[in-house]
């Protein structure tokens, strides 16, 4: 079984040594060169495929996305193909704005217990609206980019490198068509596709700075995304979890969940398997909420699910939860133990998902190595 067969066909931006950035689609272990296919008039996309990023393609809208994808699938065996091993992959789209949600009930409850032990895990508003914050688009980087350990204020009078550097395994949604005051039913008209996200987080910086305005420097230093954007239509929609209390009208109907199964590896040891299908708030509700006040989403906007954590410890999407703030270290295959990230550590988040027509599709992976 290949995870990158004709039912997946994710888009990315690649280059070969000395060459310019071009748009490609992954098929198996090859990249189909769509820039050349358009230049050869095999695919008509008004120049959208002859660009150094996906943004022009993403702005075309759903009917053209569907038509181009169908044409790529039809032509795939005959399109110019380059071995994946011979290309460099780049950030696939120019990030306009980056928003991060907080939509796993298990993650929100765990983080609440760890950071605010004197209060109930979930805040009273949590089941009434998808909580989120606006992040920093400029520091969204492609998988493989080294992650420099941030320094900052760790407490009163204390400044230095973070000692509690962490990950957050998330699913990201990439906006193609701009809009404001969107309804949940509008998701597929506006969202082009899905990436994996690692929202690197310095827990000591975060814990000191976040009150009362929320995450700031503890999360804005780097956010990694996978190089392949999997089109929304490649996924088989599934039923989201029941919501109680019923959300406000503008958040209904909730729209589908996606059955994306993540896997987190720490220096090659699999340490957790977060289940995205169990997220409380759906991407359609996040998009409707994000734009409900009249705020504009633009081509290239990235909104992330929030840390994906399931009910089990082995399903934690952050090391904060996995090691319970470092108190219960995990053992890696080389016999060493970890609470938080050490310099030189590599984290890889990968995922598969239920694809349309009963298939299993791949999302690839997002990886990063910590440097001092
Ligand atoms: O509960 C808090 O104070 C903050 C928790 C987070 O780390 C927020 C975040 O990035 C959202 C998420 O990924 O779920
Ligand atoms: Ca996050
Ligand atoms: Mg911004």
Image (spheres, helix red, strand yellow):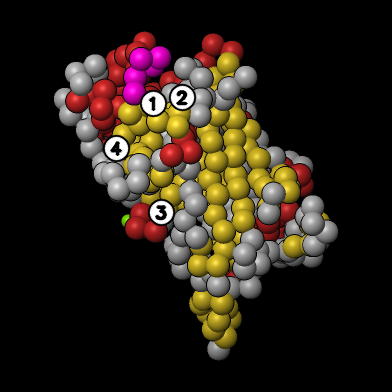
Q: What whole-number distance in Å separates the C-alpha atoms at marks 1 and 2?
A: 9 Å
Residue contact between numbered discs 1 and 2, judged by CB atoms under 8 Å: yes
Circles 1, 4 touching at the beta carbon (< 8 Å): no
The reply to whether callout 3 and callout 2 are in contact (CB within 8 Å) is no
Is residue 68 placed above or below 297 in the rendered structure?
above
Tag on residue 81?
A: 1
Q: Which portion, as a residue range, is magenta?
A: 76-80
Choose mark 1 or mark 4, whichever is in front. 1
Q: How far apart are the alpha carbons under marks 4 and 2?
A: 16 Å
Q: Position of residue 344 (x, y in %)?
A: 62, 64
Q: Which residue is mark 2?
A: 27
Which tag, 3 or 2, sits closer to the chain's start? Answer: 2
Q: Is residue 237 above or below residue 224?
A: above
Q: Residue at x 26, y 44 (%)?
A: 20
Residue 141 visible in rendering? yes
Q: Where residue 89 sits in the image (x, y, percent)?
A: 41, 43
Which SS does the magenta portion mostly show? Answer: helix
Q: Are marks 4 and 2 in contact (CB under 8 Å)?
A: no
Upstream in sequence: badge 1 or badge 3: 1
Residue, disc 3: 140
Mark 4 Cα shell of 10 Å, populated few (<14), some (14-19), many (≥20):
many
**In the image, 224: left or right of 261?**
left
Q: Please give the label number shown on residue 22.
A: 4
In the rendered view of the protein, which quadrant contains the N terminus? top right
Q: CA distance from mark 1 to mark 4?
A: 13 Å
Return the disc, 1 or 4, that comes first in the chain's sequence.
4
Does label 4 or label 2 sit earlier along the sequence? 4
**In which of the image's four quarters is ligand 3 placed?**
bottom left
- Residue at x 66%, y 45% (from the top left corner): 264
| Residue at disc 4, secondary structure | strand
Disc 1, SS: strand
């Amino acid at each position: 079984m290949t995870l990158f067969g004709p039912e997946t066909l994710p888009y990315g931006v690649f280059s070969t040594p000395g060459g310019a950035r071009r748009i490609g689609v992954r098929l198996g272990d090859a990249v189909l060169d769509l820039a050349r296919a358009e230049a050869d008039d095999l695919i008509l996309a008004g120049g959208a495929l002859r660009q150094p990023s996906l943004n022009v393609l993403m702005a075309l809208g759903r009917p053209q996305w569907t038509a181009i994808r169908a044409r790529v699938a039809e032509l795939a065996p005959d399109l110019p193909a380059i071995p994946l091993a011979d290309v460099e992959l780049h950030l696939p789209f120019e990030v306009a704005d980056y928003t991060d949600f907080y939509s796993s009930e298990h993650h929100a409850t765990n983080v609440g217990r760890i950071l605010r032990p004197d209060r109930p895990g979930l805040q009273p508003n949590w089941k009434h609206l998808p909580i989120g914050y606006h992040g920093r688009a400029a520091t969204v980087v492609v998988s493989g980019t080294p992650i420099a350990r941030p320094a900052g204020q760790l407490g009163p009078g204390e400044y230095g490198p973070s000692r509690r550097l962490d990950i957050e395994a998330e699913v990201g949604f990439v906006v193609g068509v701009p809009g404001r005051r969107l309804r949940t039913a509008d998701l597929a008209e506006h969202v082009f596709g899905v990436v994996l996200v690692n929202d690197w987080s310095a827990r000591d910086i975060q814990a000191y700075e976040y009150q009362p305005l929320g995450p700031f420097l503890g999360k804005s230093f780097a956010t990694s995304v996978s190089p392949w954007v999997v089109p929304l239509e490649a996924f088989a929609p599934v039923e989201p979890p029941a919501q109680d209390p019923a959300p406000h009208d503008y958040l209904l109907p909730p729209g589908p969940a996606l059955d994306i199964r993540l896997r987190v590896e720490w220096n090659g040891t699999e340490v957790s398997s977060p289940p995205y299908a169990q997220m409380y708030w759906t991407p359609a509700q996040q998009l409707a909420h994000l734009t409900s006040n009249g705020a504009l989403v633009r081509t290239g906007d990235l909104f992330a699910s929030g840390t994906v954590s399931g009910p089990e410890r082995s399903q934690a999407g952050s090391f904060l939860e996995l090691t319970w703030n470092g108190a219960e270290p995990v053992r890696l295959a080389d016999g060493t133990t970890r609470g938080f990230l050490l310099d030189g550590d590599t984290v890889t988040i990968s995922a598969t998902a239920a694809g349309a027509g009963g298939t299993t599709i791949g999302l690839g992976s997002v990886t990063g190595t910590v440097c001092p």
